[in-house]
Image: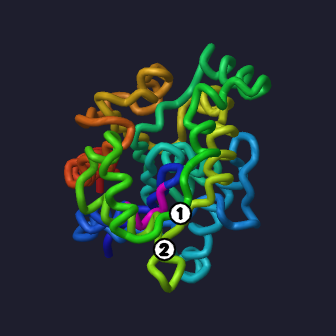
Amino acid sequence: MKDIIHFSHANGFPASVYRTIFAELSDDYEVRSIERIGHDARFPVTRDWPYLVDQLIDDMSRYRREADDAHPKVWLVGHSLGGYVSLMAALKRPQWVKGVVMLDSPVIAGWRSSLLRVTQWTGLDERLSPAAATRKRRTQWESRDAAWRHFLSKPAFARWDERMLSDYIDFGIPQTHANGARSLAFDRHIEYLIYRTLPHTLGARVAHGVPVPVGFIAGTRSREVRQVGLGMTRRIAGSRIEWMEGSHLFPMERPIDTARAVQRLLKAMQPSP
């Protein structure tokens, strides 16, 4: 029986955008995911994301119920938002989890977490994160070709592997009208709220350790890693940290290399027989 990976996506990017990575992992793992975190009314976006964590736990528990609770522990792998949610789910249900791999989800701790709390109170965090741009994000395109040309012209997206960009167009901006017009699948207001409610308490919660093994992959050009630092992340991951050439979106830029790095970390965390 294959080990199970429950993958959680980054903010604004539905899980199907990562299909190239899933395909690379599928020989050795069964990959599961929630297509759009935060879009289920039962699990709204609130400060510190408790309900988003519950959404992941609920999805895990659904599989356990279907298996009459005779269900193996799973690996949790997540990118950005998904990495944080995965770590917090592991804190809440460690008995269900083998380990966690976080893709460019550096843990905010110390004075930076205090600063984040203050900026969230004052609203300054909106200017320091992608939140402000999200509020004005374009939501509609007249055709697939128009959406493709639009994103390919942007430097950040031009670095993407073409398979990932194609899946972003197909699943992140699906056709919504008979005339071929397309709309964003990820509600931009939900995306905005996720940015505005980034957990500032996580560093304190993991300061004394995590009950499951943790691995971390960082982008060499990640602005998020530079801003947050890796102090607390190194404490919880130890030697299980890898660097991947690329930005915060390195999984989109180097999907095959990302999948292989995930596999290496999972094998390193695999319990001895």
Q: Is residue 58 shown left or right of residue 167? A: right
* Residue 240 appears anywhere in the view: no
Q: Which residue is mark 1?
A: 140
Q: Is residue 240 shown left or right of residue 24? A: right
The part of the image, by quadrant, that contains residue 155 is: top left
What amino acid is at disc 2?
Ala
Q: Is residue 15 magenta?
A: yes
The part of the image, by quadrant, that contains residue 244 is: top left
Give the percent coordinates (x, y) of residue 87.
54, 45
Crowding at dot 2, Cα within 10 Å, few <14 / some 14-19 / many 20+, comes out as some
Give the percent coordinates (x, y) of residue 247.
33, 35
Instruction: Looking at the picture, tell me which residue is in the foreground, 142 or 213.
Output: 142
Residue placed farthest to the right in the image?
121
The part of the image, by quadrant, that contains residue 98 is: bottom left
Instruction: Looking at the picture, tell me which residue is in the foreground, 39 or 178.
Output: 178
The structure residue drawn at horizontal position 53% and vertical position 37%, both measured from the top left corner, is 210
Q: Quadrant of the C terminus?
A: bottom left
Give the percent coordinates (x, y) of residue 175.
47, 76
Mark 1 to mark 2 CA distance (whole Å): 7 Å
Residue 12: give its label.
Answer: none
Q: Is residue 270 magenta?
A: no
Q: Does 134 appear above or below 139?
A: above
Secondary structure under badge 1?
Answer: strand
Residue placed farthest to the bottom in the image?
178
Q: Which residue is mark 2?
A: 181
Secondary structure under badge 2?
Answer: loop
Sequence-first disc among 1 and 2: 1
What amino acid is at disc 1?
Gln
Q: Does 243 appear above or below 146?
A: above
Tell whether label 2 touches label 1 (CB within 8 Å).
Answer: yes
For the magenta stretch, what is the residue range? 13-17
